Structures are given as C-alpha cells and as structure tokens.
Image: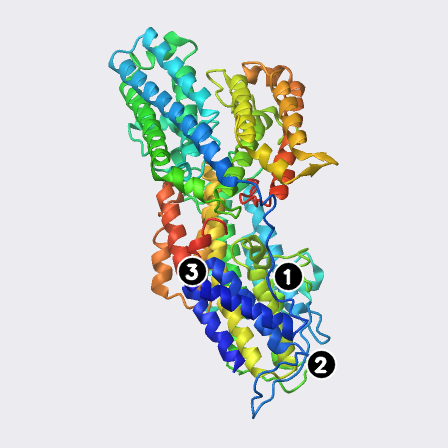
Amino acid sequence: MRKIIYLAVITVSAFILVQSCKKSAGSDDNGTGDKGSSFDRKAMLTNMSTNMIIPAYTAYQATTVTLDAAVTAFNAAPDLAKLSTLQNAFQAAYKQWQSTSIYDFGPAGDVGLRVNTNTYPTDVNQINANVNSGTYNPLLLANLSAKGLPALDYLLFGTGADNTAVLAQYTSDSKAANRKTYLASLTAEMKTNASTVLNAWNGAYKNTFINATGTDVGSSTGQLINQIVYDYETLKNYQVGVPAGVQSMGNTFPQKVEAYYSKISAQLVLLHLQALQNVYLGKDGSGLDDYLVQANAKYNGGSLNDAIKNQFTVAIAKVQTLTDPLSAQITSNPAAVTAVYTELQKLTVLLKTDMTSSLGILITYGDNDGD
Amino acid sequence: MPVLSVLILSHKIKLISNDMKKSFTAIILSSAVLLFTAGCKKSDTPTPEEPTPVYTVPTTYNFANANFADATTRLGMVTEISNLMKNALTGTFDGAKAKAMLTNTNAPFATAAYNTSGIQLNDQFSAAYKIDVLSAIDSLSKVNAVASTTASRGVAGVAASSANAASKYALTSLGVNYAQVFNKGLMGGLITYQIATTMNAAANQTIDNTTLVNGSTALEHAWDLAFGYWGVPIDFPTNKVGAKLWGSYSTQVDDGFKANKILMDAFLKGRAAISAKDKPTIVAQANIILTTMERLTGAAALQEVKEAKESINDNILRNSRVSELYGFVNSIKYNPKRVTTDAQITAMLALFPKSFYDLTLTDVNTIRDAVAKQYNFEDVKDIL
C-alpha cells in the first residue's frame, strides 16, 4: 500500500516537473537498463541451482566427509596404507572443489567458504607455529593461510621427501600428536563449513536464490555473475599468472601454484576451467549463453556468446598443454605457461567487460592491487 | 512554503527503504531545480516579505568570482606529506620534516609555491587533530626505525601483501598502518572539519555576504574553499580526473551512496544562492552538505570493510585496510557538527581487536553492521 502511494507521488511529481519546467534535468538516471529483459532469469536460476550448484555442494560435502573419516582412521593408527587413502581422499576433495568454489555468495559467502577452504600459497611458518604451540583458533583471519586444502596439501605431501618421511611426522616426530590434532581440526572445519552451506541450499536459500530475479547488485544473477567472473580471475591470476611471473616482470614463483606439494596443479586448472565453462553454458539447460543470445549481445559484429564459447574452447586447449608438476614446468618453460595466461586473459575481457555490460550487471568487487 | 516541504521530505527519507530513497532523492533534487531555476513560471504562492530571487544554477563550479586556490594548495601539501610517509617502507621517513610540513616551516615542500604560499595546514586542523596528527607521525617514525624487520604478529616492521609482493606496508606490532591513520584522520580533522565549520556558519548565516573583498563576499569565499577542500574538478562528476581524498572516496562509494551528485548539486545551488542572496536556499544546501559529509565518512568506512574482505586472507594488506577502516571511524570525532555521539564512536572503535592480527570474520561483520546502522546504510552495506 505504501508502495502504491509512493509510486503515485513519484508519478505525479514527475508529471508536474515535465509540465512545469523544461530545465528539470535533476532526476537521477543511473539505471543501466534491464537488457535482455524478456529473458526468463528465474528459469536460468532454477537450472543453475538444481543442476549445478546444489549437486556441486552435495558432491563436495561428501568428499569432506570422506576426507575427515580418512583423517580419523589415519590418526587412530597411522601407517602408509592409511596415509595413501587419506592422500587420495584429499585429492578427490581438491578436484571436486574446482567446480564448487564458484558460488561464493549467499550461504558460502556467509561462512567465507572460498577463503577458508582454499587460501594458497599456504603459510608453512604459520602451520608449524600452530602445530608446535598446540593451539589453533580457526576463527582468526590470520589463520586463513594455515588451513583448508592448501594446509592439508603441505601436511600430507610436503612434510617429508616421501611417504615414509611424511608418515614419521605423525608417528615418531616429537610433535606427532599435535600434528594429528591439527589435521583433525582442519578436516573437521572443512566438513562443518561444507555441511552448513549445503544445508542452507537444501533449505530455504534455494527459494531465495530463485526468486531474487532482478539484475541489481543484490540479485541472484548479479551475485552469480560477479562470482563467476571473480572465480575465473582467481584461476587466471593465482592458479597460473602469479606463479608464472606475469605480475612480477617474469620473476617466477613456482611454489605459489595451487596444490604445490601434491603436484596436481595442472589437473586442477583444467577441471576449474571446464567447470566455469559448464556454468556459463548452464550445463544442458538455461545458462548465460542463452541470456546473451536473448539480449542479442554483439562482439565485433558477431555474437558475443559465440566469441565467449570459442574462447573457452581455445583456453581449454591451451590449459591442456600444462603439465604436472606445474611448478616444474614454470621453472623449465615459463613461456609455455605465460602463453596459457595470455589466452585466459582474453576470456577475462569477454566475461568481465563485454558480458557484464551486455547484461547490465555491475561488477562490485575491486581489483585486489592495493592502494 | 515549498522549501519546507523539501526539508520534510529529506527528513522522511530516513524512514524508508533505499530504493525509495533514490526516488525521493530524485524528487528532492528535481523540486530543488523547480524552485531555483529561472524561467519556471509555475511558482507557488509568493512569499510576501521576501520574493524568491530568480537566478540560474550552473552545471559546473565556474562562478566568475570563485577562488579556492588556498584549499587546492593545502590538499597539495597533504599529498606531499603522504608521499613522504612512503619512505617509512625503506626506513627513510623523516618525521621532523613531516611536522615541518604541517606548519610550512623552513621551506619543507618540493613544490616551491607551497613554501612561499604563506599558508599552512596546521592552523586549519580541528583542535583534537592538531594533537593526534603528531602522535600519528611519531607512531610511524617508530615503525620506520625498524623498517628492515619483517612485520608480523607482535613485531613492528615492513611486510608485503601475500597477493602482490610489490605492495609493502609499514605496520606496528599490532598491525596498524599509521600512514593510513594519518591520511584518514586528516580527511576528518582537516577537510570535514573545514567543510562542516563553513556549512554550519552558512546555515546559521554568521558569515558576511555583503561586503566584497577581492571580488567576492566572505561567504562566497568560504563556500569556495569548502568546495575546494572536497577535492574535485569544477565539472565533477562528469569529469573525475584529479579527484582526491574525499573527492576520490565519494566516487568509490557511488554504487551505494550518490554522494557525488548530492554534494555537487548542493555546492552549485548553494553558491548560486549566495550570490543571489537567496537565504533559505543557502541554509538548505549547507544542511545537505553537512548531513552528506557525515554519512560519507560512514560510507567510506563501509567501503574499507569491503576492501578488507576482498583481501581477507592477505594478512598484511588486510591489516592496512583495516587501518583505513579504523582511521575513518576514528575521524568522525573531528567533525564539529556530527550527529554521531562520542559514546557511539567509542562503541564502534571498541569493536576492533587490540591487535589487528586477532581480527575474525565476525569482527569485520560486526563493525560493518554497526557502521551501516549508524549511518543508515543497511540496505547497501555490502556494495559501498
């Protein structure tokens, strides 16, 4: 009712303004316009949540349950077989994470799922300080770089030259008990966070998501696109660019790759990029591709959707030239890795600039380049 | 009285949602244009004593007798001090020189014109900031002395962002970047203090608007200086080149709070009204600027919350951004016409952990929510 009154006031005011005074350029027209407005965003959001987001969280949560159980079993009686099982569980979780990290809004945003799960490079000094002191406060932001998958990567693969040496850290080492406790804290936290987010999506949040059908900053489409582009930039910059030295004038940082110790970095980049492509396409259902087609978005005279799809294909082919260990490839052939980065960068422009402007979506995150 | 109805609307604005607010802002601005634009024939019942003066409000700050050179010079001095503070990253920060720059003593500036300008920063500061600025410089000097040490929890020194090794920050043992505390304090203790003081005097009509000195009245000149302190080009926000300090921040928060337009419109209308001796309009615009400057500080704080979150897993960069956040909240106390009470400022500052290394996500969200509530930004708290 109040809305109707306000609307009436606005309408009447606008009418009076137009009638009475030609110089009334005072109204604040900041609208980017709702482009492609006939597109059924609710159908897209329904497809995304039902066929992509919830399945991703379901699968990821299951890997954290397996991982946590593997830690429990390992801690009870550490041996090489259980270490191997645990390492496999870790790798399965890391692989599944590549198609789960994308949706860091809503429930995931509330718990800070992305930064709690995958802050890398991990801080070995902080991990060792936590292990040595036997105290660990998971709430401190200062511990973000000492937890999650990257910390496990170090603890399970990087604490010794081979599995026998790693195992010794959990058996004969003077801090073995502390290290086991720390391991258990980390996987328990991951399981809790994954379960919290999954439960929220299986509960009320899915409906909230599907029904916030606008394109403004708080809308589901706005948040989804922001996070897709952000997550894509994370891939481009941190999984590839920064280790290959693109931000440091060719000075490489091979140890900054994701999954440095377990040496599955290149595999993860590919899985991540394929996952992003899948989200863009909405798998087999309504996705951003359909949205751009509906909005009749153009790029260099052709279809923007075609340009993006093509660049995904080109970039994936390039990423397939990366080899594990990626850190070794960066050291031996950095040019090959920066060539991958170049193709990834082209896709950034298409997604971040062309796609968002075609759909009237505002990018709300800043570039993380300091002041 | 049309002006009265505008004021009632702007009061009412606080009770309604943000989307509505945008519309109402539009109405207010449009109504204002209606009232003040020459050639609007449909005027309301004429006020018997004082007929509404007829004049044109320009779209840029190009008033013939405008002069805000002194404010521009002072902002330039601020830039030199901020640049000097970067030396703390290499242990070469000269605190005595920074203090000499405050009082323009012994030709401390690289820009020769500043040295011979005959003006200084220090006599423009709020009384409280005059004291606090010295301790901010001293605190930075202490970190400067240990610049070769890598900053970490409990250890003062210099450290790099984990995301970008080229971005370095000088932090105290508690993680505080005093170059930022200085910078944000100055935005409150110099700029907001000056603008608020002038706007309060304009609203109370205590500045002479009759006698011409160097081609303008005292009120015209004071208003010009206030505009100059904002730090934007005269054709802002169409042109944003060179916008600095508050001019930069009003742009950074523009997604959620249209301070650029609100302030520019008010500065233009108010200045035109001053020359036309249109007192009710002068008062109305001065009040808009007063209210907006205080909310802008809250918006800037929320912008820093957002930046801190964007660097949440980067201990050094996050601490620097939290220092900016702290600096903004702390700077509110320098605004002489603030609505925020001392107790409210204290309560917000108490939400920060003693060591910024002890910050949690809950802390960040609690600070965000407290600031958003204080300045009525709850609907846009995550996008400012």
Q: Distance between the residues labelled 3 and 2?
A: 41 Å
- The answer to whether residue B149 shows anywhere in this view is no
Q: Compare residues B112 and A318 and report the one nearer the observer.
A: A318
Q: How far apart are marks 2 and 1 (CA)?
A: 23 Å
Q: Compare residues B113 and A321 and report the one nearer the observer.
A: A321
- Compared with B97, A68 (above or below) is above
- The answer to whether residue A86 shows anywhere in this view is yes
Q: Is residue A129 left or right of residue B219?
A: left
Q: What residue type is labelled 3?
A: Asn
Q: Nearer the viewer, mark 2 or mark 1?
A: 1
Marks 3 and 2, the one that precedes in the sequence: 2
- Compared with A60, B245 (above or below) is below
- Quarter assignment of residue B195: bottom right
Q: What residue type is labelled 2?
A: Gly
Chain ID, mark 2: B
Q: Is mark 1 on a helix, strand or loop?
A: loop
Residue most extreme to the left: A76
Residue most extreme to the bottom: B49
Q: Name the residue under label 3.
A: B376
Q: Mark 1 points at which residue?
A: B232
- Quarter assignment of residue A143: top left
Q: Do the residues labelled 3 and 1 touch (CB within 8 Å)?
A: no
Q: In this view, does B276 lie to the left or right of A72?
A: right
Q: Mark 2 points at which residue?
A: B215
Q: Compare residues B110 and B43 and report the one nearer the observer.
A: B43
Chain ID, mark 3: B
